[in-house]
Structures are given as C-alpha cells and as structure tokens.
Image (spheres, helix red, strand yellow):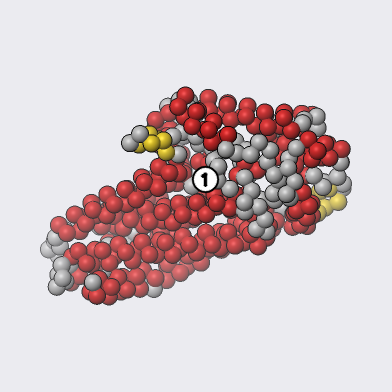
Amino acid sequence: MNNLAVLYSFELKKIVNRKIVWITASAILLICVLMSLSGVLFSSYTIDGAQVSAYDYMVKNRANARKLSGRPIDNTLLAEMQADHSRAYNEIYTYAWNLYDGDDEAVMHTDAASLYAARQSILQKQWETLKLTPREITYWQSRESSLPAVYTYEYTKGYQTILSGTATLNIMLFLLITVCLSGVFSDERLRKTDQLTLCCRCGRTPLYLAKILAGITFGLGTASLLYAAAAASSLLLYGADGYSAVLQLILPNSSWTLRAGGTVLLFFALYLLVSVLYSMLAMFLSETLKSGAAAMDLMIGGMLLSGLITIGPRLRLASQIHSYFPDHFLSMESITDNRLVSLFGAQLTNWQFVLILYPAMALVILITGSLFYRHYQVSSR
C-alpha cells in the first residue's frame, strides 16, 4: 500500500507539473468564468430610446424580481402584471410568454387556470413526441401530482445560468482532460522509459493503479475547479436567491420534482462522474494506441462526430441511447427528457440510470486497460 501511495504521488506530480497542463487549464478556466458573465459583459439594451448596459438592466430586473419573490403565481399576480405596463412584472410576463409560445395576446388575457393548463398541454405534446409508453406517462403523471398546484415565484437567474452553461462546461472539461491525460501511458513509449518502469519489483499492477488514480484525481480536481468557478461567478453576479424554488420556474416542461438548487447539485455530481469517465477513456486510449496524439485525435474526433449526429425521437431506442452519451447528457435537454429505463422491475429516470451506467463503463475500461498494460511487451529498438 505504501508503494502504491508513493507511485500515486509521483504520477500525479508528473501530470500536474507539465506546462501544457497549466496553460490549458488557465485558458479554459478563464473561458468558463467569462461564459458565466457573458450575459452582462457583451450586450446592451435600448429601452424607451435610451441605451442601457446589460448589467444595469440585470440589476433593475433583479430588484423587481426580488419584490415578487414568495408570491404565488395566481390570478392576483397575473392581473397585476396585465394592468402594469412598467417592467416591474417582467419576470412573470416572460414566464407566461414562454408558456404561450410568444403569444402576447394570450399572456395579457390569461388567468391562473389557463396558464397551468397551457403547461400541461406542453407536457402532453412532449410526451407524444418522445413516444412515451402508457406506463411512463403514468409514472410522470404521479410525479406531476406531487408538484404544487400553484407555483410560488422565486428569482432563480443564478441557478438558471449555471444549468444553461453546463453543456459548455462539459465541452471545456472534455478538452482539458483530453489534452492533459492522453499522454499518461504513451509518453513512456515516446521517451523510451517503458523498459525501466515495466520492470518494477512489485509488478505492473501497482503502477497501473497509480497512473489511473492520478488521472482520476486530476479529472475530479479540474471538474470541481471549473464548476465551482462558473457557479461562483453566476451566483455572485445574479445572487443565490431561489435555491428551494420549483424547477418548473426555470424549465416549465420538466416534470422533475427536484428544486432549483438541488438540480444544480445533482448536475455537479454528474459532472464529477463524467470527469472520471473522460479520464479513464483518455488513459485507456493512451495505453492501447501507444500514442498521445492518436488518443487525442480519436477522442476529439469522436466528440465532434457525436455532436454532428442527430437522431430524432421517432427512432426511440437509438435516440435514447444517444442521449446518454456524456457529451449530450449534461445539458438542459436531459432535464426535459422523460424517457425511462426499466431495470430489474424498477423505472429509472435518465439521471438515475447514468448513475449506474457511467461507473459500470468506467469499471469495464479499467479492467480492459489493465489487460492491455499487463500483457504489453517492449519490442526491440
């Protein structure tokens, strides 16, 4: 065990001490922070003929929204919104406007019953599009019944920004891990030190595990740093209001019963899990291809190909499998994907299923990679 700890420490230092790691990590960290702040840094608005910066607009909008926080979205609030022509009720108007698909006339004449009926109509169309089975529809109807009949408004811009930026964070993490871990195993062949390292006294297994653990640690560390930086930027800018707000204030067409803050924490856990999978895959390709450049090219090419592929819900099985790809799953779309997976008689939502799927995939990669590593022989040079 002490031997493994020493090897682990050494392998981790080998990864962290490379200049390319610091350069890439710094650039990607900066991109993640700017992404969270982009809503107020690079735009402006024209209101009543006057130019208003995006930051000033956000501050005023946030102040108005906070005055409404804690109020139920009922007939009283909707009537106030319809009678007031200022921007004091902008958040309520926007919420109703999205439910009515931009129909301003419907928004200005709606009542609470019609508003929530419009949301149910959206859900019904979504379930038909996704080709849900009667059993799946029954499952989600039971979840819908556990949601409050009337939502209480909370200002959730901070959490909404975090969730909407997770897809970009996922891409940044993928690129960072690909660049930094594709040479973990192959660099030994490149530098021709594999003859020395593979003849270790305690066998190859401790060295293999040390490299894997070091790579996973790096992946988890960078994932935590990127997500924390983006989340902190969003919450400091927009505020942490609305932690316990229903998720439907952010995504009306979602039937998840999680709260806004809980969904952000869930995505953080999934982000960490994805970082482990990316790390394992990068190191596996580094070992099997014996080339860091080839491993990097294959990973980036695979992600680009996956991003170009679009499978419609008419091909339900293929579309559902594609939705579980790590580069697709961490996005707002997954929160509205109601397709379930039946496993040993249990009905699992997509996020519950990937909590089983991703660790299983990582374990398969770990075992397969160990077989390649243990049977590798240094050829004559």
Percent position of residue 128, x then y = 53, 24
Residue 360 appears in the rendering: yes
Q: Residue at x 86, y 51 (%)?
A: 50
How busy is the neighbourhood of tag 1: few (under 14 within 10 Å), some, or many (20 plus)?
Answer: many
Q: Nearer the viewer, residue 66 or 166?
A: 66
Q: Which of 157 and 68 is in front in this view?
A: 68
Percent position of residue 191, x then y = 25, 69
Q: Would you place residue 32 above or below residue 152 in this image?
A: below
Percent position of residue 304, x then y = 43, 45
Rendering quarter of residue 342 = top left
Q: Residue at x 45, y 27 (%)?
A: 135
Percent position of residue 276, x then y = 38, 56
Indicate left or right for 175 with 29 as reference.
left
Indicate left or right for 105 with 221 as reference.
right
Residue 31 appears in the rendering: no
Indicate left or right for 176 with 99 as reference.
left
Q: Residue at x 44, y 34 (%)?
A: 340
Secondary structure found at label 1: loop
- Which residue is the site of mark 1? 331
Q: Nearer the viewer, residue 52 or 328?
A: 328
* Amino acid type for the residue under numbered disc 1: Ser
